[in-house]
């Protein structure tokens, strides 16, 4: 059963496939689903026999392998040759796309048709929407016949190997490795990785090559990684903390960092959605659309935080109303504290470009940004519970414990927030579910900024306590 994120990718891919069909007016759709493959086979042959110039979801069977082609189009209306179009919601041609196409061509030609051109139609991320979607600009069609030449001769051998695995009564004896996650996360990974310790060498920061190198050498526990090896500084700290269970805090560097904060301090966070098809003018495929923010404000040291927030509740373009509310909430003075600044600064920059009426005001916000992830990214502050990572979802529980509140939230991370928003504004979503998602989104974004307040106060108190003890 796919999780919500994977199901969304499936649904979005299906939407892209349906859009691409409009490039071939008059095409015939083979509408039978995966439970009706025999009928789909018959419908495909009937469409071919009828002289169809384009067929969508054409279905073929060859040597126990079923394939469904996104789009088959005749080279010319009367020609016996066909062009195969594989439609992808990605923004580039990937190696696994070529493997997929090679199998399709093998099966289709094995079933009696001739493919004289193979292409991949993927999204063009340079396309900017202005008015109705222009499909010929939205899609970039790439001929891949030359790239397939080295793959096609080997298809039958590899296909037979895979069929043999499916028919076998025992699972194949394959060691875990980088292939468990590339090109996709394998659904059997929880089973195959079940015997790994909770905190293993595969959690070591840095490159895959080093992690798997240790694993193949029999080093499984992260505490067994040799400290005299060629470790990077962050890896060295991670292994030392795993061994000691200790805590690392560079009071001088953190104190100097906190001196940069100017009151009133605004703790700020965006949530964004990245739909494949741009829903509003001025957007590209997969461009981030900010639909929500939360800001907690400290007027002076020791003050109780006040809170402002914004959430777009419908399918309208959220950018202009969000910018208006954001500028009011952030004012023109004081630090703007974010967690991992590259994201927020990019959204500020894009909003400034998209909203010329606010360009100068939004651009000025970036100059006030301070990244509170800095002490954790640079390992001035670290403990074993952070597992060598510095994201907010690791740092907040590691420092604040249960007060970080994420475990109790219905929406507890950014991908779920994006999907929750898209679900909330969907026309098919019942009102009760829409309201539940609205509340969950507000709680999640507010938890992020409140946790940055708590982290800031925790750092400040730790430095003050250290300064006091030194004064003594």
Image (cartoon, helix red, strand yellow):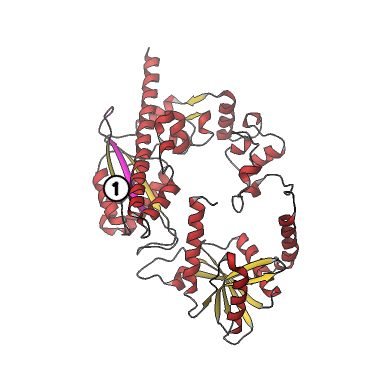
Q: Position of residue 382 (x, y in %)?
A: 49, 30
Q: Compare residues 43 and 118 and report the one nearer the observer.
A: 43
In this rendering, the answer to whether 360 lies above or below 332 is below
In this figure, which residue is indicated by the disc labeled 1?
Answer: 310
Residue sitting at x 44%, y 62%: 285
Q: Is residue 229 visible?
A: yes
In this rendering, the answer to whether 323 lies above or below 39 is above
In this rendering, the answer to whether 392 lies above or below 119 is above
Q: Secondary structure at mark 1?
A: strand
Q: Position of residue 132 (x, y in %)?
A: 37, 71
Q: Is residue 360 visible?
A: no
Q: Position of residue 259 (x, y in %)?
A: 34, 30
Number of numbered discs on residues: 1
- For the record, the magenta segment spans 284-305
Give the quarter of the figure containing the C terminus.
Answer: top left
Residue sitting at x 55%, y 24%: 245
Q: Position of residue 347 (x, y in %)?
A: 37, 51
Q: Compare residues 255 and 195 and report the one nearer the observer.
A: 195
Q: Residue furthest bottom?
A: 78
Q: Residue furthest top?
A: 472
> Alpha-carbon neighbours of circle 1 within 10 Å: few (<14), some, or many (≥20)?
many
Q: Quadrant of residue 111?
A: bottom right
Q: Compare residues 44 and 287 and report the one nearer the observer.
A: 44
Residue sitting at x 63%, y 81%: 81
Residue sitting at x 39%, y 15%: 469
Q: Compare residues 372 and 121 and report the one nearer the observer.
A: 121
Membership of 337 in magenta stretch:
no
């Amino acid at each position: 059963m796919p999780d919500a994120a994977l199901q969304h990718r499936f649904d979005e891919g299906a939407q892209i496939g349906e859009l691409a069909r409009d490039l071939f007016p008059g095409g015939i759709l083979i509408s039978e689903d995966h439970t009706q493959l025999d009928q789909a086979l018959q419908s495909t042959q009937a469409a071919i026999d009828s002289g169809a110039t384009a067929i969508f979801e054409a279905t073929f069977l060859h040597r126990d392998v079923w394939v469904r082609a996104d789009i088959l189009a005749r080279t010319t209306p009367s020609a016996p040759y066909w062009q195969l179009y594989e439609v992808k919601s990605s923004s580039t041609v990937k190696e696994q796309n070529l493997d997929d196409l090679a199998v399709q061509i093998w099966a289709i030609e094995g079933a009696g048709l001739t493919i004289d051109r193979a292409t991949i139609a993927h999204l063009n991320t340079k396309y900017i929407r202005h008015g109705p979607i222009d499909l010929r600009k939205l899609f970039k069609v790439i001929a891949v016949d030359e790239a397939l030449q080295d793959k096609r001769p080997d298809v039958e051998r590899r296909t037979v190997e895979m069929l043999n695995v499916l028919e076998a009564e025992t699972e194949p004896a394959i060691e875990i490795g980088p292939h468990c996650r590339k090109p996709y996360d394998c659904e059997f990974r929880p089973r195959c990785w079940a015997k790994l310790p909770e905190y293993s060498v595969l959690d070591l920061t840095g490159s895959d090559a080093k992690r798997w190198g240790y694993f193949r050498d029999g080093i499984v526990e992260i505490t067994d990684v040799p400290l005299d090896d060629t470790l990077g500084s962050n890896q060295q700290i991670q292994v030392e903390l795993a061994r000691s269970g200790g805590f690392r805090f560079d009071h001088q560097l953190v104190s100097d960092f906190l001196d940069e904060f100017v009151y009133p301090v605004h703790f700020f966070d965006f949530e964004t959605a990245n739909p494949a098809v741009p829903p509003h003018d001025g957007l590209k495929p997969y461009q981030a659309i900010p639909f929500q923010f939360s800001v907690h404000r400290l007027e002076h040291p020791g003050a109780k935080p006040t809170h402002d927030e914004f959430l777009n509740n419908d399918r309208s373009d959220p950018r202009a109303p969000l910018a208006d509310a954001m500028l009011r909430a952030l004012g023109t003075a004081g630090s703007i504290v974010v967690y991992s600044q590259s994201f927020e600064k990019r959204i500020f920059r894009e909003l400034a470009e998209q909203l010329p009426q606010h360009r100068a005001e939004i651009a000025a916000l970036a100059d006030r940004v301070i990244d509170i992830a800095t002490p954790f990214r640079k390992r001035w502050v670290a403990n074993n519970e952070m597992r060598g990572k510095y994201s907010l979802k690791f740092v907040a529980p590691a420092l604040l414990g249960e007060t970080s509140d994420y475990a109790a939230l219905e929406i507890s991370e950014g991908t779920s927030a994006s999907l929750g928003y898209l679900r909330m504004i969907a026309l098919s979503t019942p009102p009760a579910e829409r309201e539940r998602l609205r509340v969950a989104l507000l709680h999640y974004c507010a938890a992020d900024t409140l946790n940055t307040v708590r982290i800031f106060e925790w750092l400040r108190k730790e430095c003050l306590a250290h300064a006091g003890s030194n004064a003594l």
